[in-house]
Amino acid sequence: MNSSQDRLARVINHKDYYLRGGDMNVLIGNHLYRIHSYFFYRESLVWRQMLGESGDGEHGTTDAPVILDDVKSEDFDRFLWVIYNPQYSLYNAPVEIWLSIINLAHRWNFCNVKDLAIRELEKLDIEPIEKIVAYHEYKINKTFLIPAYIAVCKREKPLSFTEGMSLGMETVLRIADARERARQQAAESGIRSPTFDDFEDAVMEDMVREVFGVSPRPMSPGRHSRNSSGVFNSFAGSANTNGFTAHKTNGETTPGSNGSGAATKKPLDPLHVFTGATDPLPANGSTTKTDKKPQATPKDEKPPSSEPNGTSSQQTPSGAADPKGGAGSKSNGGGE
């Protein structure tokens, strides 16, 4: 009897993941799993190539299951817990479990599972060196490592030999570069015996971003691999259902939910969205702010007089309303 037949002779069904209705048999060690191939076909190109692109029929029988020699049964249990979690959206687990899950998700290219693991890791307290090592290994966006980089650069004691070996030569050199820049900047500012506590986190963050080549922080942990634009999710101010911001200035309304100004009735240029953080562009029909002071009339010219075509005079405030309706006393909305 060869080794594979000997292993099959002492195989036991897994107590949690030998599931009724499963169509895929997986053997890890002497534990036999019977699970649903649908999730593996849907999420992972690696598994689609492993099992075949058709996705029909039973994949791996009890006598000839899919064998994973390079995976521990404990790690596979944790990975399946994400898929078959009976508590639905509740995924409370310590750091070591999420690192175990993200290891398989990264190897098998389960993007959604990896995003979930990153979101959960961001909620936990992780020692900076451990976090840097793990995020580098699994190629996670470095913007999430800014606080860890700062903590390592600002600490008084240097890196130990073990820490340096785990971080790698490139990361060690970048950390040393950031620390030396901080000391040089302190010396130039006149501090005789500088400590890293003398530097604000904002200053260190700019320095760390420059040294490590880190771009601005993304809006959420889950968008490092999918849908990273999110242009309609970060507007400042009060936003309507489609992301546009409506503000009132002296009684006039800037573009609202339909993207048009109340005063001009012209469509807002879709390429210039008013976010509330900057002034709207005055070009191509967009409504400009009306709270600026009117320009002074040259001495050699007379101030404009009231016109019968509905133009308001300078004596009528732009936000004043007559009880009978409109901005003036006449029925067409014109000022007297």
Image (spheres, rainbow, N blue to C red):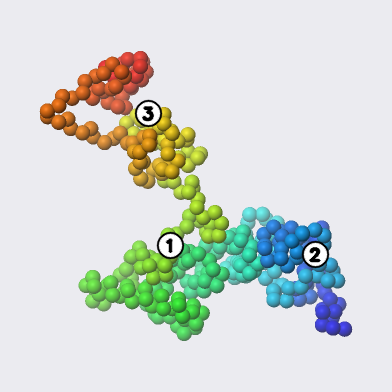
Under mark 2, the amino acid is His
Numbered label attached to residue 59: 2
Q: Where does residue 236 sit, x and y in percent of width and height?
A: 42, 46
Compared to residue 323, the image places residue 71 above or below, namely below
Whether residue 284 is visible, yes or no, is: yes
Q: Residue 247: x, y in percent?
A: 39, 36
Left or right? Give the position of 295 relative to 274: left
Foreground of the two, 189 or 273: 273
- CB contact under 8 Å: marks 3 and 1: no
**Relative to 75, 4 lies left or right:** right
Please identify the quarter of the rendering in which residue 120 is found. bottom right
Q: Which residue is mark 3?
A: 263
Q: Residue furthest right?
A: 1
Q: Which residue is mark 1?
A: 215
Check if mark 1's residue and mark 2's residue have beta carbons within 8 Å. no
- Which residue does the image show at 41% across and 31% down from the upper left? 266
Which sits earlier in the primary sequence, circle 2 or circle 3?
2
Q: Earlier in the sequence, mark 1 or mark 2?
A: 2
Tag 1, which secondary structure? Answer: loop
**On the picture, is 314 further left or further right than 207?**
left
Mark 1 to mark 2 CA distance (whole Å)? 44 Å
